[in-house]
Amino acid sequence: MKKVILIVLVTCLSCNVSKQNNTDSISQNTTIEVSEKVGIERRVDSVLKLMTLEEKIGQMNQYNGFWDATGPVPKSNEQAALKYEHLKKGLVGSMLNVKGVKQVKALQKIAVEETRLGIPLIFGFDVIHGYKTIGPIPLAESASWDLEAIKKAAQNAAEETAASGINWTFAPMVDISRDARWGRVMEGAGEDSYLGAKIGVARVQGFQGNDLASPKTIAACAKHFAAYGFAEAGRDYNTADIGTSTLYNVVFPPFKAVTDAGVRTFMNAFNLLNDVPATGNEFLQRDVLKKDWGFDGFIVSDWGSIAEMIPHGYAQNIKHAAELAANAGSDMDMESSAYVSELANLVREGKVDEKHIDDAAQRILRVKFELGLFDDPYLYCNEEHEKEVVGKQAFHEDALDIAKKSIVLLKNENNLLPLKKDNQKIALIGALANDKTSPLGSWRIAGEDGTAVSVLEGLQQYKGNTLTYAKGADVVTPDSKITFINELKINETDTSGFSEAIAVAKSSDVVVMVLGEHGYQTGEGRSRTNIDLPGVQQELLEAVYKVNKNIVLVLTNGRPLAITWADENIPAIVEAWQLGVQSGNAIAQVLYGDYNPSGKLPMTFPRSVGQIPIYYNYKNTGRPNGENSDVVFWSHYSDESNKPLYPFGHGLSYTTFAYENLKIKTLSAREIKVSVEVINTGTVKGKEVLQLYIQDTFASVARPVKELKGFRMVELKPNERQTIDFVLTEKELGFYTNKGEFIVEPGAFKVYVGGSSETTLSSEFTLE
Ligand code: BGC
């Protein structure tokens, strides 16, 4: 009876709010937003008052989907049976990895109808690059620098996810990383905080929209707070040791930006940050995020990360781990079962203040209210709607659009690209060219194997040429398990297909070689110490090169690769990442020039793995110069240049661009206008991403040699020119001190504008 009253009460309050929402006036909207917030807070409090301590703690407990909810209830599996008991008692607030309306609905029904208060569950899922319609991996999408397209991709993913019953994604990952050995670079936006912040915000806006209670939007989750991308030696889950300046100036900005953009949840991280696990880190969660940044959503732990504080040597046992995490402000326990088993006793013993439990439960309930789950717990559970929406054609069209935009032309000599459309003999070589699963990348839990368009299928659509395919070599061994959880076995020995590939190459005009990483070679738990072409692929490339030098190398990979030999020898190189379901179509359109490539690298490509961490916004040493000297006492390597293979921001087009007339105007004491003319100097229409960098040449702490502070995409016809203005304000000109304070210092600045971070077109200004 109480349950019915509770739901009626919250429904009526929300009806009033949504009726008022039909107004256009901005001021009225603001009033409504405020009153909506007040309304939600009132309703959260009214629910909280009805809850026992155990029920509040139940909200803080998240379980992985543990049995087929539409089948018989678990009896034999002890763990599943216990979880089921917890669910019925209202001791579960959220579940993850439950797929599809049928399953979600069955579990929601238990929460709503069988628990004392009927509080709905929130369902989380890793929608990282699409739900069913898998798009380019996030690192690839970031190479588009196209915020609208990125937002649209997230919007589509949200619509498809919501139609499948799920209302919360564990994305975007906004971890900055400078280490290509780390497998999870595929999931982020690369090495730069400015670009990372813009992309993070676009993704959050796409997922969440303006109305979280719409059946087309889902809650987003900024992860992993914090410094997970700084894992030592690029080994996943490893320790991060960084100073305050890097934390505030590099790691935090994307997290802060998405907080300001209203992201509703955060996930903490597996790693130690300066000796304290992020999960038990009060400074990160309570001081910075909740207090300084005013975040009022909730923080979920990473999978089992509360319990993992024990092997870290930070918690003595599971009870201690629960105490540390709850006191540090970690609101929801993903799969450690630490809160549900320990927190009530910890409160009774006075080790965890009940106000922390109230605060966490409030935060979780708040997001559930915002998602509309109290108004209609089955809001996301319409099977007809699911059938209509999941995998719909419009999603595929948008997936193709962003896949094309994600491709980066790294090198193009002798005008080998675009390929001629007629009378050419084209050889297509590489197992990845005929792979319909690998392009789906790593995070594709709801995606289906074999649903990507392969490069072979993409190229076959161009009928004017003769296309002959030869595998050359497998990337993984035939007995390798190809799953999200297993280690892949790379083919290091089988070269039996080389002779066929060589023969095909010999008799062709142009050879397209699709080489790189398997889709499961990057992602979680997939760090590498060698970031070259895996297995026998380098050998294959060199063998083919011996018989035909007209090679277009198409790379499919989830991280920057060290491909120095290829850069020195192969005339055309295309970075095609893992592009999702439309992969082969996108690649074919770029190779044939039906789409003029416009992508730019969001992460530096090293010449050698030994240069890592290598990134464009480094700080100068006291001995930066010495290239032409034979004396060793300058900062360098004896066996490799300091330079990257391809710098951050690099990417070519089938046309060329020039930059002229860089002008600087002081608008006010803290506002500088920078304008520059960009000209299409080639023969075809093309898009360019103009990048603006600054250098604070002398400051109270050393500043990077260059920092991205603006970018703009322009499309120009041959000979067309356009003037682009940027305005630099305090936000762009300042930085965080070692004490975490944001300051702007007077003095000299340099400005660079161009088509990559290596641009030399520059000017100067002085801030008074
Ligand atoms: C990952 C998270 C992910 C979670 C849930 C963890 O292992 O680190 O990024 O969201 O699992 O699947």
Image: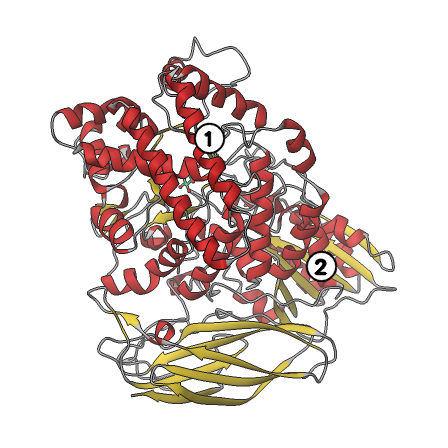
| Vertical order, 349 against 39 (above or below) | above
Q: In which quarter of the image is ligand 1?
A: top left
- For label 2, the crowd category at 10 Å Cα-Cα, with few meaning under 14, some 14 to 19 and many 20 or more, is many
Question: Does residue 719 appear to the left or right of 81 in the view shown?
Answer: right
* Marks 1 and 2 close (CB-CB < 8 Å): no
The residue depicted at 42 percent of the width and 64 percent of the height is 192
What amino acid type is highlighted by mark number 2? Val
| Residue named by callout 1 | 11
Whichever of labels 1 and 2 marks the residue nearer the N terminus, that label is 1
Outermost top residue: 75
Mark 2 vs ligand 1: CB below 8 Å: no
Q: Which of 264 and 698 is in front in this view?
A: 264
Whole-percent x, y for residue 392 in the image? 70, 41
Whether 528 is drawn above or below 764: the answer is above
Rendered-image quadrant of the N terminus: top left
Q: Name the residue under label 2.
A: 512
- Name which quarter of the figure residue 427 lies in: bottom right
